[in-house]
Every structure is written in structure tokens, then in C-alpha cells.
Image: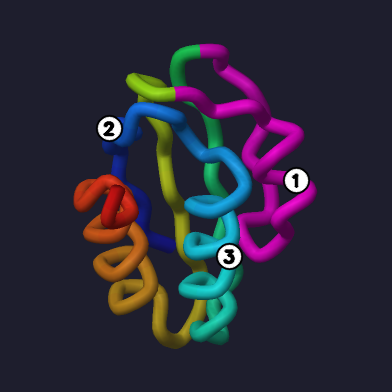
Amino acid sequence: MVSKQTSIINATGLHARPASVFVTEAKKYESTVTIKDVDKGSAPVNAKSIMMILAAGMGSGTKVEIACDGPDEQAALDALVALVDSGFGE
């Protein structure tokens, strides 16, 4: 299992469009992928579920931890962290 913390930098946080982009990217990998709000200390949610991500309500500036566990965990982690760090192209 690998994990890394980063912060959501896009102005609107993980709303519908970036959450959809995040889920689409996470589903490309066989590994289990979770994301959690480090600031709130909340439990990790399934990063392959748009409903779970939207329900977590992660806004701009939120520190998150992405964790991946499986055969392609490092590739998944690198891609998802890069996506968050890019601000989802917004």
C-alpha cells in the first residue's frame, strides 16, 4: 500500500466535474483507491465512487490523502496525485 497527501487547489474543490474526472482516472487501475479528508480526520472513502467523493464534501484548500493498494498501486497514486495537483485543468 502506498499513500500521499496533497491539497485540492482548484477553486471549487471536488465538485461534480473534477470528482467525475478523478473517479474516471481511479477506475483505470486495478488497485483499491481511497481518498480521505485529512483536515476533518474523516474515514477514507472509495475513490471509484462519485457519490462517496461528493458526499465527503472536499472543498478548495482541503488537505487529502490518497491511498492505493494493489498490483498497480504506484502508477495509480502518481496519476491521481498529479491530477489533483494540476487543479483538474480548471
Q: How is the image coloured?
A: rainbow
Q: In which quarter of the view is residue 47 placed?
A: bottom right
Residue 26 at x, y percent in the picture? 52, 71
Q: Are marks 1 and 3 in contact (CB under 8 Å)?
A: no
Residue bearing mark 3: 23
Residue 8 at x, y percent in the picture? 34, 34
As drawn, 55 above or below 80: above
Which residue is drawn at the image coordinates 62% and 47% (left, top)?
A: 16
Three-letter amino acid code of the residue under disc 1: Met
Q: Secondary structure at mark 1?
A: helix
Q: Residues within 10 Å of mark 2 (few under 14, many from 20)?
A: some
Q: Is residue 42 magenta?
A: yes
Q: For residue 9, which numbered disc appears in the image?
A: 2
Q: Select label 2 or label 1 by which is in front.
A: 2
Residue 73 at x, y percent in the picture? 40, 74
Three-letter amino acid code of the residue under disc 2: Ile
As drawn, 89 above or below 13: below
Q: CA distance from mark 3 to mark 2?
A: 17 Å
Q: Residues within 10 Å of mark 1 (few under 14, many from 20)?
A: some
In depth, the one of 29 and 18 nearer the eye is: 18
Residue 37 at x, y percent in the picture? 52, 27
Magenta residues, start to end: 40-59
In depth, the one of 21 and 62 nearer the eye is: 21
Q: Is residue 20 magenta?
A: no
Residue bearing mark 1: 52
Which residue is drawn at the image coordinates 75% and 45% (left, top)?
A: 52
Instruction: Answer with left or right where residue 89 lies relative to residue 20.
Output: left
Q: CA distance from mark 1 to mark 3?
A: 10 Å
Three-letter amino acid code of the residue under disc 3: Val
Q: CA distance from mark 2 to mark 1?
A: 20 Å
Q: Residues within 10 Å of mark 3 (few under 14, many from 20)?
A: some
